[in-house]
Amino acid sequence: MLTAFNSGKRVVVVGKRIAYSPRWEFVSDFLLDNLKTVFDREWGASASRIMPNHTLFRWLRRLNEARREIGVGVAMPIKGHLSALNRLGYALYLIEHNDKPPKSLIKRLRHPTDFDPALYEAIVASAFALAGAKIDGAEDAKGNQPKPEFFAKFPDGKTYAVEAKRKRSWKAAFDLESEEFIAELTKWLRDKLYASSKKNLTNPIYWFELGIGNQMSEQQLERLRDLVVAAVNSAEEITVNGQPPTPAYVFITNNPDLSNDDATNLSFFGLLTGFVMDDFREELLDLETAMDRHDKHRSVRWVHDCLALVQQVPTSFEGIPDELLDERGQPIETLRIGKLIAYPRKDGSQGVGKIEEVACLDREAVVVVADEATKQRVIAKVPLTEQEAKAAKKLGNAIFGKPEAPHSVITDPLRFYDRMLEIYADFPHESLLIQIEDHPRLEEFRELSRNELLIQVAREFTKRMEFLNTAGI
């Protein structure tokens, strides 16, 4: 989010326009204000009287009631209705900021009976927009052939047809071991896969929202994942007009806040799998083949990564993790480079020094401290608070003020491959060759284009890393 505080006003860049206000203390304040602007305030004033039962106005009423109870300037406890309202605002901001204002989507969101499916479509579209895709509404497509919700075109020129469907309600009670629940889940996914396949879309991506409003544990989420994968795999036997269905990417999500206004301890579920796609399955592969497939499916995998980002609305404009904010949304005191701390010296006395380096190790950190009295640099271990440990696990050492991007330790070779592509993305051809100048196929690599050579360099480093890890070096 491009933002600054200037002359008593919070300024936020939203695509091609600038929004500002002196009243925005939290990101949610801006999102709500921006949502009202995007929907059109005159429409809101009129529609709130004409159709007060519209989901959007119900959420706004509950927000106002909660604000009166809690007071101003306090971060509100997240419940389903507040989370859904914030996420709608965040989705609309991301779509406009990364692509263009979603005019046709807003028209559907204003309609009370279209709001629920359009809300899910907004969240889906925001993940594509954040991933760098351009969104085009299917209503503009020519011809009478069946249409998806929208088209997503990526910078590489490839366009995908995106379907997005929500389950409205459940007949079976929520029980992941119940035959009735499993049968309803399996049938619904099978029916949606068949209906979507009947459209015979080009490069299809299907999104299906389960609409389960119950709180789930980690074990339950894993069980749900197994049931969903089994349901999608079993549906591959269906035929459309006597022919196998078109291969498709399938996202299965569950957003409890969209189905339960009072949901708490929200756990979001998002799974990407292949439907009738032999090269997009969980299986053991050699690294070269795995990287080939990773490159082929890179754009859609990136959308999956962006889904995790759009599911978590930031609280602080400064980019401070929620784990490091107090109940009022203000930053808590943490370890930071440049901070003075007390630490135990080897002789048993207590020293005071300034932190110069920090590296987190689970629930403690190793720090390099410049002692104020002796001027010596010493290495010490200090415990982390629960909040610091959670934030460090998510974002790495960047939370301590290290001049580096947030990151976690990379153990997946394909994630390492992605990181190598990022690191060498701007290297010219000759500089890339220098990185592998000792390779026996160097002369062959000289003939590659810069983009081909970039991929080759990233793969060579990835294979070296995997060899060293396998050898235990």
Image (cartoon, rainbow, N blue to C red):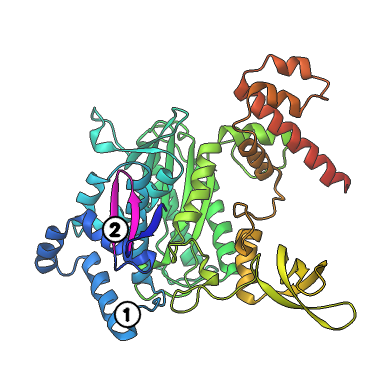
Magenta span has 427?
no
Image quadrant assignment for residue 427: top right
Determine contact: label 1, label 2, CB under 8 Å: no
**Is 164 rendered above or below residue 438?**
below
Reply above or below: 6 against 438. below
Residue 426 percent location from the top left of the image: 59, 31
Secondary structure, mark 1, is loop
Q: Residues within 10 Å of mark 2 (few under 14, many from 20)?
A: some
Q: Residue at x 35, y 41 (%)?
A: 99
Instruction: Mark 1: give few (<14), some (14-19) or many (20+) Cα within 10 Å.
Output: few
| Residue on which the image places disc 1 | 72
**Is residue 10 rendered magenta in the image?**
yes
Query: Residue 369 lies in what quarter of the image?
Result: bottom right
* Residue drawn at (44%, 65%) of the image: 316
Q: Give the residue type that dot 1 points to.
A: Val
* In this view, the mark in front (1 or 2): 2
Please state the extent of the stretch shown in magenta in the rendering: 9-21
Residue where numbered disc 2 is placed = 20
